[in-house]
Image: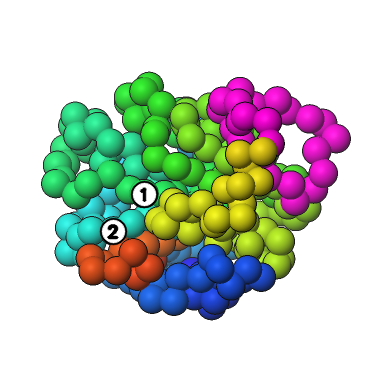
Amino acid sequence: MFHHKTHFLQEALNSGGSQSNRSLPHFKLHYSEAPFDVNGPNMESKVWGYGIFDCQRISGLEHSVKRVLKQLEHLNPVAGIIGFSTGATLAMIIASLLEERDRGLIFGVSTTHPPLKFVVAYSGFMLGHPMYRDLYHLRIRTPTLLYLGEVDTMITPKSTYRLAECCSHAEIQTFWGTHYVPRHLKTTDVAVTFVYRCLIGEPEEENEQRSRSAPKTDELTLNKHQEPGKAFPAKAPRRRLRMRDATLAKKPSGSAKQGMAVTTRLNTRLV
């Protein structure tokens, strides 16, 4: 399922999108589905959730976390995770666990995998039940690109801003749309540049432009007249959904421009 949402990223990352100097020719997206369907036999395919994610404990989340960590260990090292909706939320949870190993006690898990180099989160949000507080208590340091749809009614912009507040190195990319992975050239280029910067470093000409521009601030200034589709740095701002899709990006040793990704499809219930 997630392959159809994100397969265009494979070509864009390999070619560099509109800028060939940002190409990652050996970067590969690898998709791996969970061994069960998200929807049960008596559930309509368009059921969006099992409860309120900003206040309830998620039953079964620990199994999803264990499965993803097992995949990480198998592919070790994995460079980053790309996730959509609740998959984006799971991506942030994994990033948090890899930064502070003690956080694994929340789910009864442990791992030796190093911290991620990046997370790209489409329509992500944070979990609000008190048992998950330690995941966000110390800000997540992994470089993160957060996408939000300006007219998304499922995961509102406010929910994504709350997640951004829990990150120390976050950028927000807005787009005029609802709850989906945007395929516009401009929004795709932002993802390509972000991943390239996290894996390789700043493209030379952009590095020069940044050095001539004003220094970046850690504070997020919210502009109500923000131009749709414009990205800005964030130290910025819980909802009902099921766990959906997440992508793991692997960077094998031996080449700075190689990579791989895995997609997991997840099912959770609230109690």
Residue 28 appears left or right of 230: left
Residue 18 is drawn in which quadrant?
bottom right
In the rendered view, tell whether residue 133 sits above or below residue 251.
Answer: above
Q: Which secondary structure, mark 1? A: loop
Q: Tell me the amino acid under the disc marked 2.
A: Val
Q: Kindly identify the residue that appears in the image at 45 percent across and 52 percent down.
A: 201
Query: Residue 77, position in %: x, y?
Result: 23, 58
In the rendered view, tell whether residue 47 sits above or below residue 93.
Answer: below
Residue tagged by mark 2?
A: 78
Query: Counting residues from the N terminus, which is met first, the one under dot 1 or under dot 2?
Result: 2
Residue 130 appears left or right of 44: left
Q: Tell me the amino acid under the disc marked 1.
A: Lys
Q: Bin the neighbour count of mark 2 within 10 Å (Cα to Cα): few under 14, some 14-19, many 20 and up.
A: many
Q: Kindly identify the residue that appears in the image at 16 percent across and 41 percent down.
A: 109
Label of residue 14 in the image: none
Viewer-nearest residue: 141 or 135: 141
Residue 186 inside the magenta-drawn segment: no
Q: Bin the neighbour count of mark 1 within 10 Å (Cα to Cα): few under 14, some 14-19, many 20 and up.
A: many
Viewer-nearest residue: 159 or 45: 159
Residue 35 appears left or right of 233: left
* Residue 267 visible in the picture: no
Residue 239 inside the magenta-drawn segment: yes
Query: Residue 10, position in %: x, y?
Result: 50, 74
Q: Magenta region: which residues?
A: 213-241
Residue 68 is drawn in which quadrant?
bottom left
Label of residue 117 in the image: 1
